[in-house]
Amino acid sequence: MENSSVLVVEDEPLILLDIETGLGEAGFRVVAARNAEAAIEAFSEKPGSFSSLVTDIRLGRGKSGWELAKHLRGTSPTFPVVYISGDSAVHWGVEGVPESIMITKPFAMPQIITALSTLLNQHNPIAPSEPIA
């Protein structure tokens, strides 16, 4: 998992760049996509190369972030998902995948980093016999 990437999906170029830069500075490898279809294509090519998903909900034409997360969870039922949205957070309880995290816009980059780290640590817990670096 060391070389796995976070799949970041956001249709607003400046927000996508901010997230991509912030996660990169925090030590994450990032693959960015502007819509769900491009994200599904990237994921389908190498599903094992992704550790998690950070997605906006409203992605313009095509699939929503809700649909994207459900699609990826079809491949990996515990795949970590962080949603970001300016107006769809109220639907998270009904539309979101279980054990995901919702962050509302505007957000601070540490919110995304913390949410992602929390989900990844839950998904890949350190075994008690392994030394913690």
Image (cartoon, grey):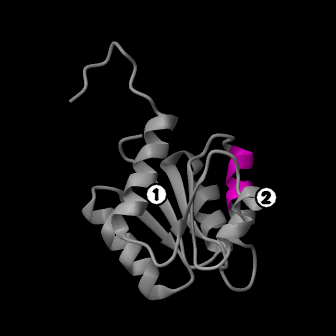
Q: Quadrant of residue 125?
A: top left
In front of the other: 66 or 92: 92
Q: Position of residue 34 (x, y in %)?
A: 56, 79
Dot 1: element: strand
In front of the other: 32 or 131: 131
Dot 1 or dot 2: first in sequence order is: 1
**Residue 18, relative to residue 27: is it above or below?**
below
Q: Position of residue 74 (x, y in %)?
A: 75, 47
Query: Of all residues shown, which one is farthest toward the left?
Result: 133
Give the residues drawn in magenta, as a range.
69-75
Specify the quadrant that holds the N terminus.
top left
Specify the quadrant that holds the C terminus.
top left
**Residue at 38%, 26% in the rendered image:** 126
Nearer mark to the viewer, of 1 and 2 = 2
Q: Is residue 31 left or right of residue 94?
A: left
Residue 4 visible here? no
Q: Which mark is residue 94?
A: 2
**Residue at 70%, 45% in the rendered image:** 75
Q: Position of residue 6 (x, y in %)?
A: 46, 57
**Residue 13, relative to residue 4: is it above or below?**
below
**Residue at 51%, 76% in the rendered image:** 105
Q: Position of residue 25 (x, y in %)?
A: 25, 64
Task: Work out how far the residue at label 1 is from the one at label 2, CA to CA, in angstroms.
Answer: 24 Å
Task: Give amino acid for label 1.
Answer: Val
Dot 2: element: helix
Task: Give amino acid for label 2.
Answer: Val
**Residue at 56%, 48% in the rendered image:** 80
Q: Which residue is mark 1?
A: 6
